[in-house]
């Protein structure tokens, strides 16, 4: 593990998180207060600045803007990021913005359109929590992956924290990156992720590959991203699964 910053991270969010997040190393949950020890939590933590934009500004200036034949939604998001984003080293600010992004993307109105009766409002809460923590992961413009936490490996982390079966963990992962299969959700995702300075990208084809996802800046080298991810993912996925709680016989 590489780390450049060991200051404890503390944030209070609008929603109380599941206390079982404490099963992962370096994270403690006390209601709405989350405390993270970067030296314990991250597999790799080389950067402690992020690009963010005010969520209220995203809501008022981007979410309701439609793409045209002259300006695709990706261009709208890129222009917004150039105009309104600022770098920050305030981790609590990043998490607070991420919470708003994912409260929007994983809201209850989407349940009816998923076609997955197994997914409930409680599963949406799991998605919001895991994706909020995932926002601390980071990819540089050259494609190097600078920050990696357990939530990079989405099915593994959610299975450990929420006692999900492999099948349900995989199903939750499909909902997480389901924007690839639903154009309306993809457009929503691109706009909302402008608040986190980029777009959500995945290193995986589908659930079995489990290469996770990260909000990456526009222009980041995906070839380098792919190669970097391939080198580390196997061993770190095993370390996440090793935190599973085995039921008493």
Image (tube, rainbow, N blue to C red):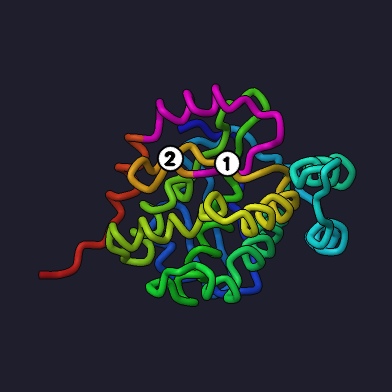
Q: Is residue 158 left or right of residue 83?
A: left
Nearest to the observer: residue 99 or residue 43:
99
- For this orientation, the residue located farthest to the front is 69
Q: Residue at x 80, y 50 (%)?
A: 67
> Which residue is located at x 32 percent, y 35 percent?
235
Can see residue 36? no
Mark 1 crowd level (few <14, some 14–19, many ≥20, 10 Å Cα): some
The image's mark for residue 102 is none
Q: Is residue 228 magenta?
A: yes
- Identify which residue, 27 or 81, lies in the foreground: 81
Q: Nearer the viewer, residue 207 or 145?
A: 207
**Mark carried by residue 201:** 1
Element on which disc 2 rests: loop
Q: On screen, 144 above or below 172?
A: above
Q: Position of residue 86 (x, y in %)?
A: 83, 44
Report how many numbered discs are placed on residues in the image: 2
Element under disc 1: strand
Residue 168 on the magenta segment = no
Image quarter in which the C terminus is found: bottom left
Residue 61 screen position, x and y as percent: 87, 58
Residue underneath mark 2: 205
Q: Which residues are magenta?
A: 213-233
56 to the left or right of 15: right
For the residues labelled 2 and 1, say whether their Cβ atoms are less than 8 Å apart.
no
Q: Position of residue 231 (x, y in %)?
A: 40, 26
Q: Is residue 165 left or right of residue 98?
A: left
**Residue drawn 42% across and 71% down?**
119
Quarter holding the N terminus is top left
CA neighbours of label 2 inside 10 A, class few (<14), some (14 to 19), many (20+)? few
Above or below, 150 relative to 114: above
Which of discs 2 and 1 lies nearer the camera? The answer is: 2
């Amino acid at each position: 593990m590489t780390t450049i910053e060991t200051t404890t991270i503390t944030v209070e969010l609008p929603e109380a998180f599941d206390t079982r997040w404490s099963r992962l190393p370096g994270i403690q949950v006390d209601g709405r207060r989350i405390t993270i020890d970067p030296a314990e939590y991250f597999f790799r933590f080389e950067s402690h600045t992020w690009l963010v934009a005010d969520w209220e500004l995203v809501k008022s200036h981007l979410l309701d803007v439609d793409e045209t034949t002259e300006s695709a939604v990706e261009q709208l998001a890129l222009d917004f990021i150039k105009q309104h984003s600022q770098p920050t080293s305030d981790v609590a600010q990043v998490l607070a913005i991420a919470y708003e992004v994912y409260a929007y993307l994983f809201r209850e109105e989407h349940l009816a359109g998923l076609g997955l009766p197994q997914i409930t409002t409680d599963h949406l809460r799991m998605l919001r929590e895991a994706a909020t923590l995932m926002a601390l992961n980071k990819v540089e413009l050259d494609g190097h992956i600078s920050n990696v936490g357990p939530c990079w490996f989405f099915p593994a982390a959610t299975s450990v924290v929420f006692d999900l079966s492999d099948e349900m963990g995989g199903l939750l992962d499909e909902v997480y990156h389901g924007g690839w299969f639903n154009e309306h959700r993809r457009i929503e995702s691109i706009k909302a992720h402008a608040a986190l300075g980029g777009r959500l990208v995945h290193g995986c084809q589908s659930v079995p590959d489990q290469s996770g996802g990260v909000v990456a800046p526009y222009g980041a080298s995906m070839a380098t991203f792919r190669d970097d991810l391939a080198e580390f993912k196997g061993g770190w996925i095993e370390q996440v699964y090793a935190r599973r709680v085995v039921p008493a016989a």
